[in-house]
Image (tube, grey):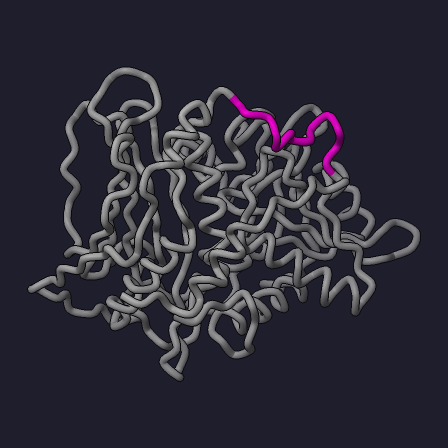
């Protein structure tokens, strides 16, 4: 099969060298990218590099004989409806990546001793395909998802892969499932690339086999009736991530431990947790999203956009990265904002609220793009985040959502939008 024109462009993005560590990361917390850490599979790196990588030209397709009926778009619930097919690629330590297959959606058959069940050898990504009224289908920054998935799997001794080749296969998979993507604004096809260790063993070590698969779920707008600002419970008794851990990787093992604190916050009437870290109560993430705060500088009144730095405890969200780049270009350069990746505390936010300097706050992620925040409960008080009682979103959150969606749906041509 011929590769689409985007293949070479995506490959060049993925093969670009890693940028130098930003200056805002304190020296004591700067990662040394050159260190070969013992927890990676780098002891086998030379042998693994010689094995076959993913080859899109070897793809085989077996179409379903029982196509599913389409659900009415207004009835879609996130992650409950799935398409007709799935994409699967197996890997073994002796053969490398085997030919990719698109098959009817089906259950997996795994031995009870499979290592993923016992030692959490699992990593995943979340990305979307968008269709506009011109019937164009687009992916949003797939090279960033591929880069992040490779960083995640190498941290847990699963095999790396050619990200451009997987993007090519995902594009073909999405084309096959095109009928499941509504063309209305706010709707999309959610894609879940997942890699698991599949070796049948109770021994603890690098898996000798793995499975990379992609499933797809049509989804509707995160806010079907418009923005709804959420309330947060500032949480320091439970920790989402810590220095030297895996909070900066998209591993399933990071998510399950957050459910109980979320349930506890819900019992108190709050939608999500705002994760605080350390004695200073540094603000990190909100639920499963990155967190942004808009604050006016004391004295000068200069507008500032803050988010926590990528110090090893923060997940490098694709939407986070996009918000920062757009903010530096459109808010910083054109409107004089200070856009900063920096450590800041919950006390600083509370003081800004008390002094009338807290303008707004929002979370960012693939599902919602942006999620406005109304208040944060901290040490027995509700810290208001700048919204008026009749407002559901601040100006920056609303503008960011609009800017990103016009790129995702192809209203404006942009390098981040990959037409397939």
Task: Look at 39% across and 44% down and name the residue there.
Answer: 161
Q: Is residue 159 left or right of residue 361?
A: left
- Please determine whether, in this image, residue 382 is positioned above or below residue 132: above
- Front one among 184 and 23: 23
Q: Position of residue 93 (x, y in %)?
A: 29, 30
Extreme residue in the top direction: 203
Using the image as rendered, state which of residue 67 and residue 203 is in the foreground.
203
Q: Is residue 389 magenta?
A: no
Magenta region: which residues? 25-37
Residue found at x 47% / y 32%: 261
Q: How many marks?
A: 0
Q: Residue furthest bottom?
A: 134
Q: Is residue 162 left or right of residue 313?
A: left
Which residue is at a point 68% across and 34% down the rendered structure image?
282
- The percent coordinates of residue 260 (x first, y second) are 42, 31
Q: Main secondary structure of the magenta part?
A: loop
Residue 354 lies, with reference to residue 390, above or below; the image says: above
């Amino acid at each position: 099969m011929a590769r689409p024109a985007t293949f070479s462009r995506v490959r060049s993005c993925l093969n670009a060298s890693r940028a130098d560590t930003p200056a805002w990361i304190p020296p004591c917390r700067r990662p040394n990218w050159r260190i070969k850490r013992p927890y990676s599979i780098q002891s086998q790196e030379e042998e693994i590099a010689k094995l076959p990588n993913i080859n899109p030209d070897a793809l085989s397709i077996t179409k379903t004989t029982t196509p599913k009926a389409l659900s009415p778009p207004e009835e879609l619930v996130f992650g409950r409806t799935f398409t007709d097919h799935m994409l699967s690629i197996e890997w073994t330590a002796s053969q490398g990546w085997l030919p990719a297959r698109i098959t009817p959606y089906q259950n997996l058959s795994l031995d009870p001793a499979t290592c993923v069940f016992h030692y959490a050898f699992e990593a995943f990504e979340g990305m979307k395909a968008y269709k506009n009224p011109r019937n164009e289908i687009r992916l949003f920054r797939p090279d960033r998802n591929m880069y992040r998935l490779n960083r995640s799997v190498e941290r847990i001794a699963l095999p790396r892969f050619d990200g451009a080749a997987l993007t090519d296969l995902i594009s073909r998979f999405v084309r096959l499932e095109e009928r499941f993507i509504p063309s209305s604004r706010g709707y999309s096809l959610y894609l879940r690339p997942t890699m698991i260790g599949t070796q049948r063993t109770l021994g603890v070590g690098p898996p000798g086999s793995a499975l990379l698969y992609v499933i797809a779920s049509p989804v509707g707008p995160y806010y079907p009736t418009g923005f709804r600002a959420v309330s947060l419970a500032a949480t320091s008794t439970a920790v989402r991530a810590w220095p030297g851990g895996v909070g900066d990787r998209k591993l399933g093992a990071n998510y399950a431990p957050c459910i109980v604190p979320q349930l506890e916050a819900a019992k108190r009437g709050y939608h999500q947790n705002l994760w605080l870290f350390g004695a200073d109560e540094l603000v990190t993430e909100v639920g499963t999203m990155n967190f942004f705060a808009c604050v006016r500088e004391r004295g000068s009144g200069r507008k500032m956009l803050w988010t926590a730095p990528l110090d090893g405890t923060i997940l490098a969200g694709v939407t986070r990265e996009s918000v920062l780049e757009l903010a530096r270009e459109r808010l910083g350069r054109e409107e004089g904002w200070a856009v900063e990746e920096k450590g800041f505390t919950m006390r600083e936010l509370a003081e800004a609220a008390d002094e009338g300097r807290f303008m707004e706050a929002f979370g960012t992620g693939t599902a919602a793009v942006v999620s406005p925040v109304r208040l944060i409960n901290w040490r027995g008080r509700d810290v208001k985040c700048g919204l008026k009682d009749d407002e559901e979103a601040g100006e920056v959150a609303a503008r960011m959502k609009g800017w990103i969606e016009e790129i995702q749906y192809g209203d404006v041509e942009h390098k981040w939008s990959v037409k397939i």
